[in-house]
């Protein structure tokens, strides 16, 4: 039997499950897979996912955290800050101070909290020298505040498998289905529910060909830049995919 009977997930596209599409056009992601893993050990297990793509930290705090704490779940997975780190004028100390307060709000509500040290996305994106220090600084801050709040930490940055292209989508920002499954395995292992599966075999990541870079820039980088210039977001008009705590069984969510 698991000591957790309910899970709420809050965050952005990483937590929503973008990159792991289902035939009906919705997304699955590590959150659904984690819920399934926990539900196998807790009859009557309930799960909600409030995450919405494109959301920044302050939006997550304002829109999702009150709803999450109001459900009084046993467990909350919280990921935020990735979209903030992609913006100019990023101040890691200011962001992580607000992140710290958000984690405090979640733990004060009585939930156990799961946080993430994010993998290094800078190796696949422009300006890696700018992005990588931001990722490292955020991860270091997460490690520190997790200790203060008694939160669980899933260390994706320390998992070399996330350097392999097969765990990422063509847009280079979001995890592939295999990537989401690996995150779920890591979460369950961190919670002591299941062991980490055999590591993806290490290998050399081949250099991207110039034509692949050009296609990526046209299909993904260009639209992202246009949204930044116009103040838009990939989450405009998108709502939470599972806004209420509802029962989960092993067969109620796609695996």
Image: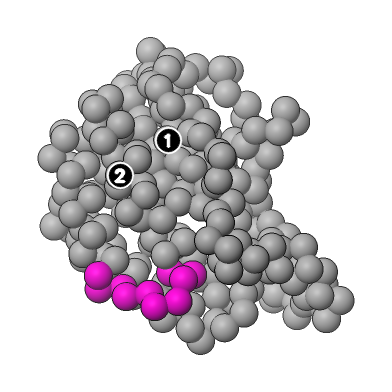
- The x and y percentages for residue 56 are 41, 56
Which numbered disc, 1 or 2, marks the residue closer to the eye? 2
Q: Which residues are magenta?
A: 85-94
Q: Is residue 14 above or below residue 43?
A: below
Expressed as whole percent of the image width and height from the top left, the position of residue 168 reads 65, 59
Image quadrant assignment for residue 69: top left
At 39% across and 60% down in the image, what residue appears?
A: 81
Q: Mark 2 or mark 1, which is nearer the start of the sequence?
A: 1
Instruction: Identify the image quadrant of the N terminus.
Output: top left
Q: Residues within 10 Å of mark 1 (few under 14, many from 20)?
A: many
Q: Residue at x 68, y 39 (%)?
A: 21
Q: Residues within 10 Å of mark 2 (few under 14, many from 20)?
A: few
- Residue at 78% in and 68% down: 218
Q: In x, y percent, where is residue 171?
A: 69, 61
Is residue 48 rendered to the left or right of residue 201? left
Question: Of the numbered discs in the image, which one, if any, rests on residue 39?
Answer: none
Q: Would you name the residue on which mark 1 appears?
A: 50
The question of residue 88 being in magenta is answered with yes
Residue 55 appears left or right of 201 = left
């Amino acid at each position: 039997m698991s000591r957790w009977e309910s899970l709420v997930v809050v965050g952005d596209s990483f937590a929503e499950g973008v990159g792991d599409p289902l035939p009906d056009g919705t997304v699955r992601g590590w959150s659904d897979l984690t819920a399934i893993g926990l539900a196998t050990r807790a009859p009557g297990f309930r799960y909600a996912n409030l995450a919405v793509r494109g959301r920044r930290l302050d939006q997550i705090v304002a829109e999702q955290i009150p709803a999450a704490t109001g459900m009084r779940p046993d467990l909350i997975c919280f990921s935020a800050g990735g979209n903030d780190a992609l913006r100019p004028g990023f101040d890691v100390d200011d962001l992580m101070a607000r992140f710290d307060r958000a984690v405090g709000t979640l733990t004060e509500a009585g939930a156990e909290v799961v946080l993430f040290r994010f993998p290094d996305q800078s190796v696949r994106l422009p300006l890696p020298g700018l992005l990588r220090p931001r990722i490292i600084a955020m991860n270091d801050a997460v490690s520190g505040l997790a200790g203060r709040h008694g939160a669980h930490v899933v260390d994706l940055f320390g998992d070399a498998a996330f350097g392999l292209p097969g765990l990422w989508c063509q847009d280079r920002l979001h995890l592939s289905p295999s990537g989401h499954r690996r995150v779920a395995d890591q979460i369950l292992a961190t919670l002591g529910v299941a062991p980490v599966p055999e590591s993806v075999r290490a290998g050399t990541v081949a250099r991207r060909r110039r034509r692949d870079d050009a296609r990526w820039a046209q299909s993904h980088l260009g639209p992202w830049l246009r949204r930044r210039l116009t103040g838009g977001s990939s989450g405009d008009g998108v709502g939470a995919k599972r806004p209420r705590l509802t029962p989960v069984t092993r067969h109620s969510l796609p695996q």
